[in-house]
Amino acid sequence: MAPYTYENPLPEDGFLLPKDLAKLANDIKSMRIRGAAEIGRAAADGLELFASTSKASDIPAYINEFDSAYDLLLNTRPTAVSLANALRYVKHRTVKASKNSLDVDELRALTIRAAEDFKKSSLEAVRRISEYGAKRIKNGDLIMTHCNSSVAIAILKEAKRQGKDFNVYATETRPRFQGRLTAAELAEAGIPVTLIVDSAARYFMPKVDKVIVGSDVVTANGAVVNKIGTAQIALAAKEARVRVYVGAETYKFSPSTVLGELVEIEERPVEEIIPKKELENIRGVKIANPAFDVTPADLIDAIITERGIIPPQAAILILMEEYGWKIGDEDGGRAMVEEED
Ligand code: RUB
């Protein structure tokens, strides 16, 4: 199934669903489906698929099965905030409705609607971000991007659509080379792009006008968690006085960080770095493979959200507005209470 993007949105009669929940979960786990926005929408797909195939005959049985599907999906990439927030969005609405006097078929339909609403609003958020972000790109710009962010790519494509003339450096993004996907997609869109190794980022930075990346998580203090290597690029950008823009939908903002929770960084299998066979030739060597790193707010010039462009320090305001947190809440605000429903 082709990924939903804001350019490849929904058929009129709703989303095309994958056929099998276990396969979908496995596709997220194995990173066949990847990128924060896409895994958020895939998680919503999973709950929609569950609801449309569930045979539960009453509400307690339905909620019970719902929880199993929820846990299965949550554990595919347990540190991904977009995935968790997508699941919470659907769960909150389902559990709240289950307390009203609906029958189980109405509840199934409600789960499906909630999942579709999440996917639609996620695509609409990317569309808006692309418009806000494209305004920052000028003719003649040289832009560096890292990894394969659908949001960063949407900004670049929108700028191209508006007739702007600019060039892009795309880092290859070891160990999984997501940068190759980015380079191919930009080239296909007619945007001149040069693929570089990750370690060449600082070498090229003095020529660059802007860095534009996506985000997996935005924390309450405006730090951004994104593909490993983003923080190094931001550091090189700061040294060269190059502006760093991050495209992030508000469902990537993490409510639990308001109260000082740290974002857990996913550690990926060592075979992503060295194939098992070659590992045998270098016995005694440990390998570390963190998937993401944290770029602090002071290395970021602005975060482009669907609600507008904000300085990273204003991330807390987004969390207060989106999730109802206020000073004195001891539990992280409405969002944290709701997720316990
Ligand atoms: C992908 C990555 C992307 C963000 C944002 O990591 O770090 O920059 O997820 O992507 P991985 P998007 O390949 O490990 O999933 O803008 O599409 O949400």
Image: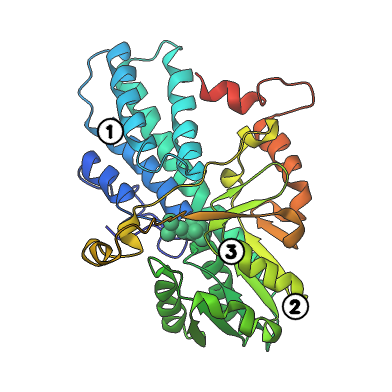
**Is the residue indicated by label 3 positioned so its CB lies within 8 Å of ligand 1?**
yes
Q: Of discs 1 and 2, which sits in the foreground? A: 2
Q: Secondary structure at mark 3?
A: helix
Name of the residue lying farthest toward the front: 284
Viewer-proximal residue, 291 or 30? 291
Question: Disc 1 or 2, which lies upstream in sequence?
Answer: 1
At horizontal 24% and vertical 61% (from top left) the residue drawn is 276
Which amino acid lies under the numbered mark 1 shown in the image of this protein?
A: Phe
Locate residue 258 relative to residue 145 in the image: left or right: right
Which amino acid lies under the numbered mark 2 shown in the image of this protein?
A: Ala
At horizontal 65% and vertical 44% (from top left) the residue drawn is 219
Distance between the alpha carbons at the discs numbered 3 and 1: 36 Å
Question: In the rendered image, which residue does mark 2 sit on?
Answer: 240
Pinpoint residue 51: horizontal percent, then vertical percent.
Answer: 29, 31
Q: Can residue 311 be seen in this snapshot? A: yes
Question: In the rendered image, which residue does mark 1 sit on?
Answer: 50
Q: Quadrant of the N terminus?
A: bottom left
Q: Quadrant of residue 318?
A: top right
Q: Residues within 10 Å of mark 1 (few under 14, many from 20)?
A: many
Q: Secondary structure at mark 2?
A: loop
Viewer-proximal residue, 160 or 330? 330
Question: Disc 3 or 2, which lies upstream in sequence?
Answer: 3
Locate residue 330 relative to residue 217 in the image: left or right: right
Question: Disc 3 or 1, which lies upstream in sequence?
Answer: 1
Question: In the rendered image, which residue does mark 3 sit on?
Answer: 230
Distance between the alpha carbons at the discs numbered 1 and 2: 50 Å
Distance between the alpha carbons at the discs numbered 3 and 2: 15 Å
Q: Are marks 3 and 2 in contact (CB under 8 Å)?
A: no
Locate residue 20 relative to residue 289 in the image: left or right: left
Which amino acid lies under the numbered mark 3 shown in the image of this protein?
A: Thr
Pinpoint residue 55: horizontal percent, then vertical percent.
Answer: 20, 23
Pinpoint residue 254: horizontal percent, then vertical percent.
Answer: 60, 40
